[in-house]
Image (tube, coloured by chain):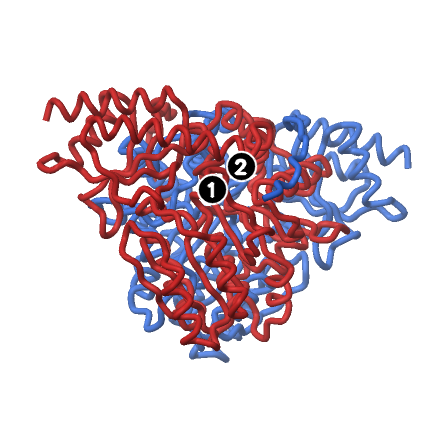
Chain colours: A red, B blue
């Protein structure tokens, strides 16, 4: 009965960074403060009332009237998995568009449910090509789903979600859309565009803390879920069980898992701020700040990875100037300016930086800091 | 291009409850405050240093030197699922002890990975019976795992984890242990008892906010994971990928998913407070507070569900007195005293209350409030 020694560890005081990487983004001060409010029980009527508000706010953010709209109690990659494990059954065929890391992650999810992924590849930095998607849909009349990433966080490319979802509908497929980086940052209209399943992340353009994944299923997706012949392979992500707690269609809520109560306070506040600003105003702000950043970066001689017509305002992937030490620059920005920008990911590792202008980070003072700091650091190299 | 109307929602101000249900428990004030500290990037060296401290603190709390010790970025039920999806392969046999809701949940997890659950049932309110387990191990020499719940949150029964893990070892099985409600509240020694896989929850005796699941795998469990012939069915919970981020064995950390940064600040602080108090002192505090609560409840004529020798100090399941309206009493405690106690779950729904004395809630002032309030409400009935 010897007890292992206890470590002597001091309270943690993080520095105040400016977060201009691919997420987490700068969090609104009132969102941070919301989290620190007293914890309620997950079945407390007051908490349950707040969850109803979260649902309304998510419906607004997604522009949907989908009854099955909620936040998965885990990060965006769990939201992605929730879509695939709930909707796709083993042996079914999914057309997966891959133009970056997250399309590839979709493929892995499809294969882990025992389904078949048909890949439509595009070059990194380019949007998904609707013509190539249509050809794949024609060549695979047995495909049941079209899955793609609206805003590729690894490259900064924006794909035409409206056109892709129209193609999915035309060929009898349900659409599964990754909106992790798009929600709140660029135009996104779930009902109008006919999106069937969509997931996002709390830590991007919502400027909430990381850890939650907003999710919405259309009535057609819910029908597919209800018609499953096999059980959902994940108990934790089984939306038929989760909805008994989130209260789909009214009635008493029953316990499934303990909700991340305080994180949901934060999500409530971040969505409330988005509604207060207004979706269209938030989209316009991201677009305007992106142009300001672009002009400044071009003055520094820095070039964008993505062609102008497909750039995401909230995620600016730029080529690292020749001869510049990638890690040294990022490290110096962090040390000297408490400023975080993102490294390249996957095929762009070592070749690009990713500069985020997400949510609360899409502000003129952030851009001024970044341009001044980056210019200074590059001049010293 | 019509935009759905935005809901008009006010900031949320939760009341200050005293949480004496089955969890979430009262959260330490400094843990709530820790969450509100500025968000760091998930690859920021300062944040990564804090994660190393979380790992050391978890090793202390679990009493283990297991290298694979971390927090799953989701609630306890995801921790449970992480154990089964990583370690158990389709077709393998798992002896599952079922003496409440969470043993049943283990069965569902086993079956959802395509494995075979052999059930050892005990009456609700009783601990798992080691003799029945040994009989099942003898009758199933091909079983690969023994899975059980150390502290059954649905009934308040404590099972003899040390004896059960010794049996598992004797019969060549790996043990999978649910310590959601036990960690920090009662004696638990992962290495000394030979536990192979264990998971817990942040919102019970650690008195942290809900949403994270501490997890630890022994070297034997890691070996089993590495020897898998089939891929882990969950991408999000695949520990071979997660460990590339949590830094198993040193080296550069690589991105898997965005860690719930602020929730991990909270976990760091709650584990730090546990270490500061000392594990054995925390166990003793829970035991002492339980006796004080028991004496008071007995004076009110209230009886325990679980026999004295198997009671969990941190989760007191008691029978609702005859003729008393379950929901009305809980509702009045909440409305008049801001005091939450738990309803019965599963077979005990409507028959029992669950009174938690977990972590920061295991304090004399909480007990005084509960006894006074409950006595008052019952007297009025």
Q: Nearer the viewer, residue B380 or B263?
A: B263
Query: Which quadrant of the figure contains the C terminus of chain A?
Result: top left
Q: Could you tell me residue A153's position as x and y percent?
A: 36, 45
Numbered label attached to residue B236: none
How many marks overall?
2
Q: Nearer the viewer, residue B180 or A102?
A: A102
Q: Chain of mark 2?
A: A
> Can residue B115 be spotted in the picture?
yes
Which SS class for mark 2? helix
Q: Are the residues at dot 2 and dot 1 in contact (C-beta closer than 8 Å)?
A: yes
> Can residue B279 be spotted in the picture?
no
Residue at screen point 32% across, 56% down: A99
Marks 2 and 1, the one that precedes in the sequence: 1
Which SS class for mark 1? loop
Residue count near mark 1 (Cα–Cα under 10 Å), binned few <14, some 14–19, many ≥20: many
Q: Is residue B378 left or right of residue A179?
A: right
Numbered label attached to residue A263: 2
Q: Could you tell me residue A345's position as x and y percent?
A: 26, 47
Residue bearing mark 1: A211
Residue count near mark 2 (Cα–Cα under 10 Å), binned few <14, some 14–19, many ≥20: many
Mark 2 and mark 1: span between their CA atoms?
A: 7 Å
User: Image quarter for residue A57?
Assistant: top right
| Residue B79 against residue B278 in the figure, above or below | below
Q: Chain of mark 1?
A: A
Q: Is residue A172 left or right of residue A47?
A: left
Q: Could you tell me residue A46's position as x and y percent?
A: 71, 35
Residue at screen point 90% across, 33% down: B380
Q: Could you tell me residue A125's position as x and y percent?
A: 29, 49
Q: Is residue B323 left or right of residue B334?
A: right
| Residue B371 against residue B239 in the figure, above or below | above
Residue at screen point 34% across, 26% down: A292
Q: Nearer the viewer, residue B128 or A34?
A: A34
């Amino acid at each position: 009965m010897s007890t292992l020694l206890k470590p002597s560890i001091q309270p943690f005081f993080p520095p105040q960074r400016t977060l201009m990487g691919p997420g987490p983004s700068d969090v609104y001060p009132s969102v941070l403060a919301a989290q620190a409010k007293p914890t309620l029980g997950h079945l407390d009527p007051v908490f349950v009332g707040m969850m109803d508000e979260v649902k309304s706010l998510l419906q607004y953010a997604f522009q949907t009237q989908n009854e099955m709209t909620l936040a998965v109690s885990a990060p965006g990659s769990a939201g992605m998995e929730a879509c695939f494990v709930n909707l796709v059954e083993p042996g079914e065929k999914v057309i997966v568009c891959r133009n970056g890391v997250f399309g590839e992650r979709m493929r892995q999810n499809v294969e882990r449910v025992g389904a078949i992924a048909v890949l439509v590849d595009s070059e990194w930095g380019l949007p998904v090509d609707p013509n190539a998607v249509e050809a794949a849909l024609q060549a695979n009349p047995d495909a049941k789903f079209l899955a793609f990433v609206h805003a590729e966080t690894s490259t900064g490319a924006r794909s035409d979600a409206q056109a892709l979802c129209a193609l999915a509908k035309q060929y009898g497929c349900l659409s599964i859309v990754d909106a992790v980086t798009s929600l709140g940052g660029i135009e996104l209209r779930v009902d109008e565009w006919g999106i069937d399943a969509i997931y996002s992340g709390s830590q991007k353009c919502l400027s909430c803390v990381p850890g939650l994944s907003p999710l919405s299923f259309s009535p057609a997706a819910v029908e597919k879920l209800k018609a499953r012949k096999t059980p959902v392979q994940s108990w934790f992500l089984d939306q038929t069980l989760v909805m008994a707690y989130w209260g789909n269609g009214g009635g008493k809520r029953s316990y499934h898992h303990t909700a991340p109560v305080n994180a949901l306070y934060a999500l409530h506040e971040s969505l409330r701020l988005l509604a207060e600003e207004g979706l269209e105003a938030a989209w316009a702000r991201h677009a305007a700040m992106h142009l300001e950043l672009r002009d400044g970066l071009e003055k520094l001689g820095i070039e964008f990875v993505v062609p102008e017509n497909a750039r995401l305002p909230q995620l600016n992937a730029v080529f690292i100037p020749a001869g510049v030490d990638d890690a040294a620059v990022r490290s110096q920005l962090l040390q000297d300016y408490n400023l975080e920008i993102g490294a390249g990911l996957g095929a762009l590792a070592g070749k690009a930086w990713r500069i985020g202008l997400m949510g609360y980070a899409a502000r003129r003072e952030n851009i001024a800091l970044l341009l001044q700091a980056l210019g200074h650091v590059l001049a010293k190299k």
